Amino acid sequence: MTNKNHTAAAQEACDRIHARFSQVALHEFRGDTTLTVPREQLVPIMRYAKEACGFDMLLCVSAVDHLGKEPRYEVNYTITQAETGANLLVRTLLEEKDASVPSLVGVWRSANWLEREQYDLMGIHFDGHPDLRRIMMWDDYPYHPLRKDFPVAGVPTETPGIAFTEKAPTSGAPFVTVPGGKTAAEREPRSRN
């Protein structure tokens, strides 16, 4: 199936979802459609997308931290129709004071570990998740490393007998650039050698 057909299948599904759920906002960019849905309607919309529109796979759950803005967080879900290859991005926005969203484990079992990853690294709480615990960091780790307010070098932490972290040396690392009016290539540390 061509990309044009993928887009048509996704657009048809979006139109059906938008007709059924009035608070859904549609955004199209370069042939990809994004649905922005209210947190309260996330589960019914995703169940409808699966059962009535044929989106039978949850591929990805990710989160974005818009530090300094409200709503601070967005949680993004990429769902697909295996038969057509059509993808759809569904997102919901969360305020900093209540960074929680309903779990989709009851709709797609693959949401289990994907939600745990976002809980661990971003601090997003998934209400109703059957086993919401950290998946990468140790249980008592007090931070969420993918939030924008987490220092790039890390935070020294010690949990006796379990784990520890030290600040990571970032001086001269390939991802550390110098701010300024130069081009990205000129700011890159290896260009200063």
Image (cartoon, rainbow, N blue to C red):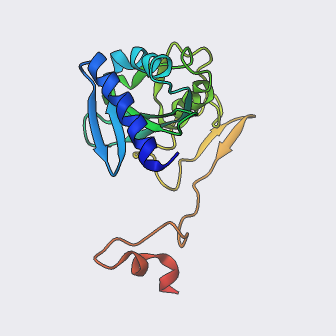
Residue 158 percent across, percent down from the top left: 64, 40
Could you tell me if residue 93 is visible in this image?
no
Q: Is residue 66 above or below residue 127?
A: below
Residue 95 percent across, percent down from the top left: 30, 28
Q: Is residue 35 above or below residue 173?
A: above
Could you tell me if residue 63 is visible in this image?
yes
Foreground residue among 45 and 98: 45
Foreground residue among 173 and 76: 76
Q: In which quarter of the image is residue 94?
A: top left
Q: In this view, does 67 lie to the left or right of 53?
A: left
Q: In which quarter of the image is residue 53?
A: top left
* Residue found 31% across the figure and 36% down from its top: 72
Q: In this view, does 48 lie to the left or right of 140?
A: left
Residue 118 percent across, percent down from the top left: 52, 33
* Residue found 24% across the figure and 19% down from its top: 22
* Residue found 50% across the figure and 24% down from its top: 54
Q: Is residue 136 above or below residue 177?
A: above
Q: Which residue lies furthest to the right in this view?
A: 161
Q: In this view, does 10 lie above or below 167?
A: above
Residue 105 percent across, percent down from the top left: 56, 18
* Residue found 35% across the figure and 40% down from its top: 33
